[in-house]
Image: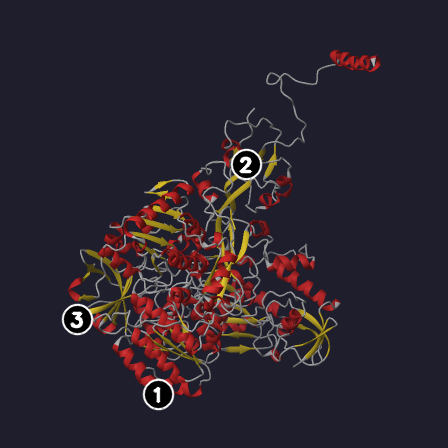
Amino acid sequence: MSAVGQERMIEVVDRIPEEELAKLDPIIAKYAHRPGYLIPALKEAQEIFGYLPQEVQTRIAHGLNVSPSYVYGVVSFYAFFTMVPRGRHTIRICLGTACYVKGAPEILAKIEQELCIGVGGTTPDRRFTLVEVRCLGACGLAPVMMVGEDTHGNLEPGTVMDILDQYK
Amino acid sequence: MIKPLIKGLGVTLKHLFAPAVTIQYPEERWEPYPRYRARHIMYQREDGRPKCVVCMLCATVCPSRCIKIVGIQDEKGDQYPRRYEIDLGRCIFCGFCVEACPVNAIGMTTHYELDGPTRESLILGLEEMMRPPRG
Amino acid sequence: MPRLTIDGQVIEVPPGTKVIDAAEALGIVIPRLCYHPALGPAGACRLCAVSFLDGPVKGVLMSCSIEARDGMVVSTEHPEAVSFRKQVIEWLMMNHPHDCPVCDEGGHCLLQEVTVASGHCRRRYPGPKRTFVDQDLGPFVQQEMNRCIHCWRCRRFYQDYAGYRDFGALGIGWRTYFGRATSGVLESPFSGNLVDICPTGALTDKPSRFMARRWDVERAPSLCIHCSLGCNVTVSAHLREIVQVEARYNGDVNGHFICDRGRYGFDYANHPLRPRSPAVMGEETSWSKAIAQAVAGIEEVTRAHGPKAIGVVSSERASLEAMVTLSLLCEETGWEGPAFFQDEETLVKNRLLAQVALSHGIAGLREVEKADLILIVGTDPICEAPLLALAIRQAWRRGAWVGALDPRPIELPLTFEQSGLWDEELKKALLKGAQREEGLEEVLPGWKEALDRSREIVVILGPTVVDISSLRRCGEFVSKLGKKARIFPVFRGPNSLAASALSRESTFRSLARKIREGKIKALLLVEADPFHGTKMRGELEASIRSLELTIVIDYLPSEVVKRAHILIPSATIYEGGGSFINQEGRLQRASPVHRGGIPLRRNLQGNLRPPRTFAKGPPGETAKSSWQVLLELGERIGKGLGIEDKEDIWKVARERFPFLWQVEPGGRISWEGGGVQEEAMEEEEDPSQSSQEMRVLLVTSTFAGEELSQYSSKLDPVRNEARAFFNEEVASQRGLRRGDRIWIRMGDVRVPFSVKTSPKVPSKLLILDPGNEGLWREVREVSKTIGWTEIERA
C-alpha cells in the first residue's frame, strides 16, 4: 500500500515537449495499478517515440509508481529497448556461435562498409540502425540477420545489400 | 707506573700535531655523504601539487608515528594530501617512509640543520616540505 | 541430518545447510565474495568452488549454492579446485584497477585478501580495462565503479533485503552498473550497510574517507545508543576522534546490519563545542576546583534547606552504571530523585509498557523476523527504531501479514495495511479487538484471515502516540490473542527499560513543580538535557533560572550545559564504555574504544596544534565517566558508597537490583515490570476542541529529533525540514497542497513548516515533525491545539 520513495523523484527535464509526453498518459492509465506491467508499458512507449529517453522513463516511473532507477535498470537490461533515437529499420545481425562460424563477420563488415556506419550507429538519413545480437534462435539458417521484424537467413556478402535495398 | 704515563702523553702529543677532526661551525659546514638521511622533501607533480596519493603507508610504517595525513580528492578523482605533517621532534630519520612510498613522493635531503625556537616549529608542514631546504 | 566429509573431517549439519557453511563450522573458510549469510547465495563470483569427489554430485562446483547432502566427499584443496579459484581471481582482477594504495578499502578488502592468497600478481591480458563513470550517491557512500567485481551484494541488500528501489543493477553482462538512474542521495536509511557488505572498494564510507588505514585505528566492540534496540557495533577511533562505526554481528539482536542513524550519529563525540574541561560559572577550571566547588555548593544547600532541596535528574541515555550509582547516592543522601523521565505520563507509560511486554512474553528483533502476523500499534518503525523496519521486512518476505494502527503516515519498505486511528478511536478498536477475534477486521482488512493462519504473533507497541489506557487495553488485547502473541516494546532511549525499573515517583516535571514551590534549590543533572524535545520551554527556563545551584555532568554541548553553574564533563560511551538494557531486556556491555581528547584533525584544519601542557593524558581528555564523577562527589560529601570500579558497581547492583542483574551480559533480564503506581498519575484532561481546532501531535523523524545524533554533523545533509502532516481532505478544503510552505503561529513566534498530506492522518489531528530542532529555540510553549487562524501561507 504505502511504498518508499514516492516523495523524492527526479525532476522531469523538459526536452521532449509536454504534448508529446502526454501521449504516454493512456499507457500509464492502462498499467498504473497492475504491478509487473512495466515491460509492456515501456514497449508501447518505445513504439510511440522510437526510443526511451530519460524524460519518458521518468514519466513512466512516476505513473507506475516505481523508482526511476528500476525503470532504467529494465531499459538498460533488455537489448530491444534503446535510449538513443534509431533509424526506421533496425538491422540486427547475429554474431552467435553458429552465425559467426558460418561467416557473419564478413557480412557485418560488408554492411558496415556499404552503409558507412559501425555497430550501434545510425545512418545520417535515419534509414538504418545497425546492432549486433548474440543469437536469434535461427541457427539452422546461419548466418542470420533481422531487419525490422523480418528475419533473413543464409546470407552471403554479395547479396546482403539487395535485401537491404527492399527497405526504404 | 711511569711507563703508562709516558704512553698516554705520547698519544696526546700525537693528536696535537695531527689534523683536526672538528670543524669551525658555523663558518665551516660539514658536507654530508649523499646517502645521509635528514629533512624530508615532498616531490611535486607536473601541476605543482604534491606527488603523494594518501595511501598512508608511510604513516603506517613510521616507527615513531610522527606522520599525520589528511587527504582530499579532486574532481578527476586524483587523491592528494590536504595536510601532510611530519613532527621532526619525534622523527628518528630511519627512512622507512621513503622506502614504503609506492609513488616515490617522499624523499630525504641531506639538510641536517633542523632547529627551531618551539616544539611547534619543528612540525614540518606540506608547503615547507615541498620547498627545497634552505642553505 | 546429512553427514558429509570435508577435507577428511566428518560433520553432521542440519538439512538445508550450504556446503560453505558446513565447512565454516569445521573451521575451514572457503574464500567467497558474493556469498553473505544474510543475503544467501548468488553464485556470481565463482570463487567458492570446491571439488566434490564423491556423493550425489561430482566435479568442481560452487559450495555456496549446493546444500549439504548425505555422503558428500568434499575437498577444498584439490588441485583442480585450487587452480579454478586461482583463475577466477585472475578474471576478476582483469578489470580491477590495481589502485590499492589510493583505495580506502585497502587493508580490509576481501578482494585484496583473496588476490594475495591466490598469488596473482601479473595481468596477462593486454587489452584495455572496462571503465565506468561514477555517480555521487550522497553524503554516506562513495562509489568507485571501476573497482566493482559484480558480486551483486549491494543490489541484493538494497533491493531484496532492505526493499528500496532507487539503487540497483543497471545494464547487462560485463557492463552491469550498480547505481541510480541519476546521481543523487540514496533514499534508504540503511544505505551505510552497502559499505559494510561491499567486498571491494567499489562502495566505501564517505565520512571516513582518507582518514586512516584499518590497522591505524583503535577499534573496540561497542553498542549503538541512538534508539532502544541496542544494536551491536564496532567503533573505530583515530587521532582522538571517532571516525567510523560499523555493524557488528550479533545473531540475537541486530544480525549483520545497522541503520544510518546508528552508523553516522557518532559525531556528537567529536563535536567542536563538546565540553572538554570543567567550568564554574562558564569559566574553565581544574577538576579538583570544580569538584570542590560542587561539594561546597551541595553542602551549603543541604545546610540551609536540607537534603530534599537537591533534585537529581538523569535520562534514558545514561549508562546503567550511572543509573545505579545515582540511585544508590540518592538513597544514601536523601536527595530528591533520581528522575529519568520528563513527566509522569511518560514514566507511567514506560513502566506500563515494560510490564505489559514482560508479562506477555517480550519479543526482540529475531522474534519479529520469525513472526507471521505483525501488528504495529503507535510506532513508526523507520523513525523510532529504524532497524525494526528491516526486521519486519524479513518477516514480510517470508509471508507475514503486517498491519499498523497509527495516525502518522508510516512508510515501510513493504506492503502493509494501515489505519490512521488514535485516541478514542484507537481505544475503541483495541477494545473491539480484545472482545472478538475479528474485531480489528473493520479497521484493518485482512486481519481475520491473517489471524486464523498465524502461529507467531508480534505486537509492536510504542509509548509515544498511544495513551495510558490504550496501552493497558493493548495488554488485554494481546492476552486475548493467546500464548502465541508477544509484545515488542519500542522505547525512546537506549536504557529506558532500566530507567523505568529504577525510577521512583520523581520525574522531571514533578521536580520542576517543587522548584516553583521553592522546595528544591539545587539540581544535579547527569547526562540529561530537559530542554531536548520539551514542549514547555518558557516554563523550564524560568525554573532553571530560579535555582541556586545547577550542576551538570554531561558530554553534549546541550542547552542546559550552557546554563550550568558548575559543569563537569563526562566520557561518552566511546571513552568510558557502559552497560545498557535494550528494549527486549537484554543486558549488553560496551567497551571503551579510545581515551578521547580534542581531535587532532580539528587542529590540523586550523593549523593549530593542541596546547602542549605537560599532563599525563592527551589534551582535552575526559577521563571520567559520569558514574566515576558521582562516586567522587559522594565520597567528598561524606556519603561514600564503598565502590571503586565497575566490578564493584556490578556486585552492588546484583545485590540491590537483582531483577536487573541476575543475567550475564547478552542475556535477558527477568524483571516482571514492577508495580505501576496508578494513583501517581493524574489524568490529563482532553483539551476542549472546537471545530476549527486540531489536536497537535509532536513526532520525530529518523535523522532529526534523536538527542545524540542531533549533534552529529555527518547527518546534517540528510536531516529533513520541519514538516506538518494534514489530513488530505481537510488540507484540500483549505487549499493546501503537498509541498506548500506555511507558517504556524505559536505564542508570539511563527515557525515555518512544509505541508505533507496523507489520507491516513485523522482529520482532527495535526502532526508536527520539528525536523532540525533549531527552529524551536524561540517557541516558549507548544500549544495542545492549533486553529486554522494560526496557520498562514508563506
Amino acid of disc 1? Glu
Q: Nearer the viewer, residue C381 or C473?
A: C473
Tell me the distance, in whole angstroms, between the alpha carbons under discs 1 and 3.
34 Å
- The label shown at residue C438 is 1
**Which residue is drawn at the image coordinates 29% and 78% (left, top)?**
C426
**Which residue is drawn at the image coordinates 57% and 49% (left, top)?**
C216
Q: Quadrant of residue C732?
A: bottom left
Q: In this rendering, would C402 be left or right of B133?
A: left
Q: Nearer the viewer, residue C378 or C618?
A: C618
Query: In which chain is the residue bearing label 2?
Result: B
Tell me the distance, in whole angstroms, between the alpha carbons under discs 3 and 2.
70 Å
Q: Badge 3 is on which residue?
A: C688
Q: In this rendering, would A71 be left or right of C763?
A: right
Q: Position of residue C204 (x, y in %)?
A: 51, 57
**SS label for mark 1:** loop
Q: Nearer the viewer, residue C430 or C90?
A: C430
Q: Quadrant of residue C583?
A: bottom left
Amino acid of disc 3? Ser
- The label shown at residue C371 is none
**SS label for mark 3:** loop
The image quadrant where one finds the N terminus of chain B is top right
Q: Position of residue C598 (x, y in %)?
A: 45, 44
Amino acid of disc 2? Asp
**Which residue is drawn at the image coordinates 57% and 70% (left, top)?**
C37
Query: In which chain is the residue bearing label 1?
Result: C
Q: Badge 2 is on which residue?
A: B87
Q: Nearer the viewer, mark 1 or mark 2?
A: 1
| Contact (Cβ within 8 Å) of mark 3 with mark 2 | no
Q: Position of residue A20 (x, y in %)?
A: 32, 69
Is the same chain shared between marks 1 and 3?
yes
**Which residue is drawn at the image coordinates 39% and 41% (left, top)?**
C289
Q: Nearer the viewer, mark 3 or mark 2?
A: 3
